[in-house]
Amino acid sequence: MTAADAGTAAPSHRWAMLAGVWLVYACFGATAAAIAPLVSHITEELALSHTQMGSILGAWQFVYIGAAIPCGALLDRLGARRGLTLGALVVAASGIMRGLATDYPTMLLAVAAFGIGGPLVSVGAPKVISQWFVGRERGLAMGVYNVGQAVGTIFALLLTSSVGLALAGGNWRLVLIVYGIVALAAALVWYAIGSHGASRAMEQRSAAEPRQNQAEIFVELLRVPALRTILVLAFGTFFFGHALTNWLPEILRAGGMDLASAGLWASVPVFVGIAGALIFPRLAVPRRRMAILSGLFAAQMLAPLLIEWNAGMPLALGLVLQGLARGSLSIVVVLVLMELPEVDSRRMGAAAGLYFTAGEIGGVLGPLTIGTLYDLTGGFAAGLTCLAALCLWQLLLLTRLRAVLR
């Protein structure tokens, strides 16, 4: 059953499916971000060194890199309903395990577990969209569910320590357990939505179709020139996004801001990104998709140069441009991936697994590269220039992508 068939069979249910994905993705974002505002409390109570805490914060990303491809294959086998439910359950378990951790190994394991649930959610979400939405609605749906992650992240960063910790009487364990329980509730809500008759009919139709060996699917996908180019774009996009997002408060502080002001200014791209996620993917229909990608990469290229300027209006413009690109670039690239002739809804899990694996490798290397360049040069100018050069390279890659898509 195609997305068009699904929309005809149950025209309103696709929006319920989108709402369910949004809810799960919001819990994904909130659970991923919830530990950061509690670092000082966790470090003190568990007697952790800063090195140990750093390894805990990065544990799920390393697991994610290895898990994304097999999780994508598993999703294609299980179907979106069960696969996304399993992912949300693992995210919930990770949140609850964090609240129950007693030392470094148990906290490390709790956070690392998120790296298994995370790919099932982030790969499962575009698979659902590829099944239920087509045309302009597909771009809108991609933007909407990505806003869910942004909302969850903002909620966790702004309210975990200021409100959550106060309501829990200073008990950080209870706060993290509550995040896990909310994710568990989201998993159950999603499963209920996915159990609708139209969803089950699509699932049964898909299960009845001939199965191909997963190894063969990955080999065939990697032979597609456009997909290989998209994987390189994913690497660069995540490299840039993780590097600038993680270092932005410190970059602003190095430019003379106090800690509170730097935190406030660093939140600007997050809020602007919500608008970008709702606007650009919807506009990115095939005939103007490359033009929109070119514009977004150009905006992202200018952003670090304006931020390096670190003066009033140029800084504000740089943060806005970064937000617009941050909120929509990856979504539009995934749209291109989703609509490759070699990638149908049955192969979307495998293709998305490859995409997020390439992306998260860049996501790990990005912050590391900026930190290394800072140590070598004594400032952030070299790192910001490196990020601008990366975007110029990605603009050149778009010409190759445009050529192989013809």
Image: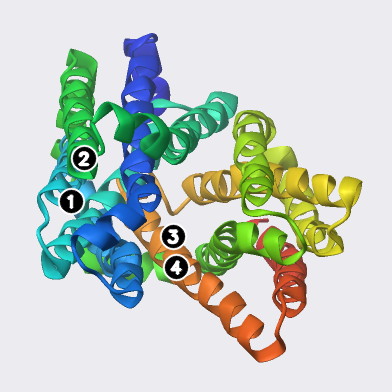
> Is residue 379 rendered to the left or right of residue 129?
right
In this figure, which residue is indicated by the disc labeled 2? 171
Dot placed on the residue nearer the N-terminal end, 4 or 1: 1
User: Distance from label 2 to label 4 (Cα)?
Assistant: 38 Å
Camera-side mark, 4 or 1: 1
Q: Please say which color scheme the image uses.
A: rainbow
The earlier-in-sequence mark between 2 and 3 is 2
Question: Mark on residue 272?
Answer: none
| In-front residue for pair 281/146 | 146
N-terminal of the two: label 3 or label 1?
A: 1
Q: Amino acid at mark 1?
A: Arg
Q: Is residue 313 visible?
A: yes
Q: CA distance from mark 4 to mark 3?
A: 5 Å
Q: Are marks 3 and 1 in contact (CB under 8 Å)?
A: no
- Horizontal arrangement in the rendering, residue 170 relative to residue 305 (left or right): left
Which residue is drawn at the image coordinates 51% and 44% (left, top)?
339
